[in-house]
Amino acid sequence: MGGNSGAGYDRRGARSIVGASPDRQSPVTDDYANPLRLAIYLEIGWSDYFFAPPARGKRDGALPYPNPFVDRVPPDFPRHVARLAKLWATRIGLNATTYCDIGGATGRAVFEMERTLPALQRLLLVEPSTLFCEWAERLLASGAELPPVPVVDRSGAQKLVAVVTRPPPIANAHERLSIVNESLEDYHPQGRFDLVTCLNVLDRHPSPRLLAEELPRLMSDRGLLVVSCPFDFREESTPDKEQWVGDLNELFTNDQWEHVGADELFYEYRASNRQWTRLCAQVVGKRCTGFDASVATRRSSCRQNSSHTASAFLTRAPAPTK
């Protein structure tokens, strides 16, 4: 997948996509390289473009909204997060020009931030799933016609439909956008970012504390971090229950982080036409105040030489369907 679209994506990397080596298998391939998983993420990210609203007749006598038989999950979550990021950046006098999204799936958060914060010039999406990176490149960097997309239907069913329309690509994406097919632990960017987001990823990571410790090395001096989590921890993702925090302030403490803002947002997904899941995610804005770059670099280098495999969990995985 990826073809000859705008940024020239391939497994070896290109100007707008820095990918894994051709012989390296993505650590999340088995979990994410399937039509149903992709369908869930494309719907929660791009349903407003891909699908027409249900016809009036389909709603007559039907279940009220949200009805998983006829309704699609709208991309409200990334829209609201972008508005919060703008609000909190204004609060601290930050005119962000560089942005990084960790575990950004198919790229809707990057799309919304670029529209909401007009000063952004450099955009980076770090995503370990090769399949999701391919779709992020199609949606964010290419204006080419989209192929039929997998859709959420009966549990386990595979169904493709043509899209109604597609989102406009990011302007000058070949110069401004990078999509990195790596885990955060394995990736070491040149330069730092004024704005960093990590959205609904921590409770799908084997060590949320470890992931939280990685984030400051991405941030510019006094930059803004926006993190969200619905605390939907599971043993298959985070086996050590001692890691199951219940408040983001446990991970981003006052001795290293200045509190900028907080909110609660619904995070929704539809895993089949009989399942509409709604979670409430805590969202916080933080500004790093106690970061030692040399310590973080040494720590990250040690982890690269260890057998740690947390990278397989950087993208959020909804509940498996049965």
Image (cartoon, rainbow, N blue to C red):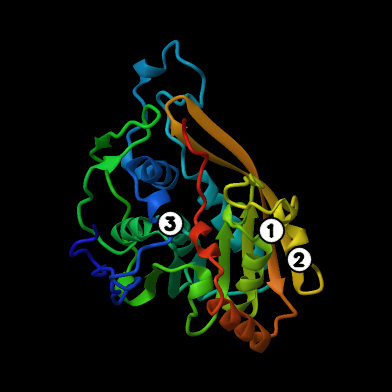
Instruction: Examine the rendered structure and indicate whether residue 169 appears above or below residue 244.
Output: below
Instruction: Compare marks 2 and 1 and give the one earlier in the sequence.
Output: 2
- Pointers 2 and 1 in contact (C-beta within 8 Å): yes
Q: Residue at position x 21%, y 47% from top?
A: 147
Residue 102: assigned label:
none
Q: Which element type, helix, strand or loop, lies under badge 2? A: strand
**Residue 90 in view, yes or no:** yes
Residue 231 picture location, percent across and down: 67, 47
**Residue 172 in view, yes or no:** no
Tell me the kind of residue under disc 2: His
Residue 292 picture location, percent across and down: 70, 85
Q: Which element type, helix, strand or loop, lies under badge 1? A: strand
Instruction: Examine the rendered structure and indicate whether residue 113 appears above or below residue 56.
Output: below
Residue farthest front in this picture:
307
Q: Residue at position x 52%, y 57% from top?
A: 313
Residue farthest bottom in this picture:
294
Residue 16 picture location, percent across and down: 32, 73
Q: Mark 3 highlights which residue?
A: 28
Q: Which element type, helix, strand or loop, lies under badge 3? A: loop
Tell me the kind of residue under disc 1: Val
Instruction: Compare marks 1 and 3 and give the one earlier in the sequence.
Output: 3
Question: Which picture quadrant has residue 43?
Answer: top left
Residue 259: assigned label:
2
Q: Mark 1 highlights which residue?
A: 284
Circle 1 Cα neighbour tier, 10 Å, few/some/many (<14 / 14–19 / ≥20): many
**Spatial distance from mark 1 to mark 3, Cα to Cα?**
27 Å
Instruction: Compare marks 3 and 2 and give the one earlier in the sequence.
Output: 3
Given residues 275 and 204, the one toward you in this image is 204
Residue farthest right in this picture:
255
Tell me the kind of residue under disc 3: Val
